[in-house]
Amino acid sequence: MHGPPLAGLLLTALCAGVAGLCLLRMRAVAAEERRGAAGDALMGLGMAAMALPAGLPGPAAWTAGAFAVVFGAAFVRAVLPLRAAGHHLHHAIGALAMVYMAVAMGAAGHGGHGAAAGLPAVTAGLLAYYVLYVLHGGLRPVAAGAGGPRGPVPAGTGTVAGWAARPELAGACRVCMGTGMVAMLLAL
């Protein structure tokens, strides 16, 4: 990632932490929600790897192609089922954004010499999408009247599995990753 190394390290830590939470969530939720949790975990791990600062040992030059292939497959997987659920469309857009960033960062690495990577119009469109997504996701709990305790946790859910299955965690993970995507697109 271009930009200050500290910002890259913090973004890597945020994305890796969110991916870990998504993996926990994947184990704790019902079968129909696992696919979304798996997609979130893949996105978080990919973002963590992409966000590593350039001076640190991390992804080599050939990994841009590997990222493009992996997230191209994730895009196909998100689009093929043709489900009505909105976050499948979000996963498809996220996968395309990751392919775009991998290709742009790979092209910049092959002669970019610090120049801005990517197409400004595409980057601006993705930035607009993710800023609106983060604002909408962040304001949704406020509009619903969230803020105070929601009552007691049901019996048997005091474990990590019970905590990881809470619906608020999925929204919080997606908002964190959306914020990370905004930072990565700005650094592109």
Image (cartoon, helix red, strand yellow):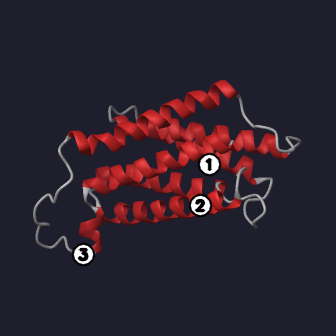
User: Distance from label 2 to label 1 (Cα)?
Assistant: 19 Å
Residue at label 3?
Answer: 159
Quarter holding residue 85: top left
Of circles 2 and 1, the one toward us is 2
Q: Is residue 8 above or below residue 65?
A: below
At 74% from the left and 53% from the top, the residue drawn is 63
Q: Which sits earlier in the primary sequence, circle 2 or circle 1?
A: 2
Q: Amino acid at mark 1?
A: Val
Residue type indicated by callout 3: Thr
Give the Cα distance between marks 1 and 3: 33 Å
Q: Amino acid at mark 2?
A: Thr
Which x, y percent locates residue 33? 31, 51
What residue sits right under mark 1 in the picture?
Answer: 70
SS under mark 2: helix
Above or below: residue 122 compared with residue 176: above
Q: Residue at 63%, 41% (x, y): give it.
A: 186
Determine whether the residue tagged by mark 3 lies in a helix, strand or loop.
loop
The image quarter in which residue 30 lies: bottom left
The crowd level at tag 1 (other Cα within 10 Å; few <14, some 14-19, many 20+) is some
Q: Which mark is residue 12?
A: 2
